[in-house]
Amino acid sequence: GENVEQHPSTLSVQEGDSAVIKCTYSDSASNYFPWYKQELGKGPQLIIDIRSNVGEKKDQRIAVTLNKTAKHFSLHITETQPEDSAVYFCAASTGGFKTIFGAGTRLFVKA
Amino acid sequence: NAGVTQTPKFRILKIGQSMTLQCAQDMNHNYMYWYRQDPGMGLKLIYYSVGAGITDKGEVPNGYNVSRSTTEDFPLRLELAAPSQTSVYFCASSSPAGWGLNTEAFFGQGTRLTVV
């Protein structure tokens, strides 16, 4: 069946460094790719999303890139801060109601 | 502006007991979802609803039931709880931008359920 693979499962960076999380999806019909941040004890919250007709999107320190040919998309966080520490989930959606989530990446930003 | 509200936040059930997880949203979203999150795993869709009176199964529906009598509420029912249902449950809602165009899902804070 369709799946989304997310790597790495854990990422530790020094404050100020960049963090990159990568996802690969299997369903070529996927057209919407959101990224969610989940802080301890809370529900996931959208931080950025991209649609299949766009290759890159930026929002301040966060950027997402999409390579539809390779079925690959990535989250880039620059100038990381301790408050960026959380679990990050990628997801791929075909529209309709099918959204497949990756397993998550636990990001630690060391001060 | 409450968003998506889930109750309870925590619950311990004995094997074979039943319970209902409550979910309400005040954003007038048509679409609502129930997910479960197991340690080290992504979110798995249990059930979803596209509007009042309409529900459908997701990836892992066995052992659960839902109803959607109003736009705002989407309760999840567990019958005959089993240890395999120990998980964190999230309710979410969204409002698609158009046909086939998904948009952001808004999540509740979750219900941590333990079945012993």
Image (cartoon, grey):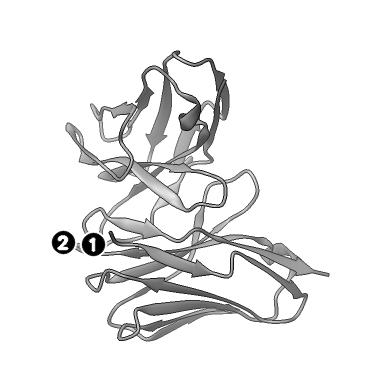
Q: Is residue B75 left or right of residue B113?
A: left
Residue B111 in the image: above or below residue A66: above
The quadrant where residue B51 appears: top left
Q: Which residue is mark 2?
A: B99
Q: Could you say where residue B56 lies in the image, as x and y percent from the top left?
A: 21, 39
Which residue is disc 1 drawn over? A95
Binning the other alpha carbons within 10 Å of mark 1 as few (below 14), some (14 to 19) or many (20 upward) gives some
* Nearest to viewer (mark 1 / mark 2): 1
Question: What is the CA distance from the residue labelled 1 to the residue labelled 2?
Answer: 8 Å
Q: Is residue B3 visible?
A: no
Foreground pick, A28 / A94: A28
Q: Looking at the picture, which amino acid does disc 2 mark?
A: Trp
Does residue A87 lie above or below B85 as drawn? Answer: below
Secondary structure category for the residue under label 1: loop
Given the image, what chain letter belongs to the residue carrying mark 1?
A
Give left or right: position of A44 versus A18.
left
Q: Which is more toward the observer, B17 or A99?
A: B17
Residue occupying the point 32% across, 61% down: B103
- Quarter of the image for residue A54 reads bottom left
Q: Residue at x 36, y 23 (%)?
A: B77
Q: Nearer the viewer, residue A48 or A6?
A: A6
User: Can residue A31 be seen in this snapshot?
Assistant: yes
Quarter of the image with the C terminus of chain B is top right
Contact check, label 1 and label 2, Cβ < 8 Å: yes
Label 2: few (<14), some (14–19) or many (≥20) C-alpha neighbours in 10 Å:
few
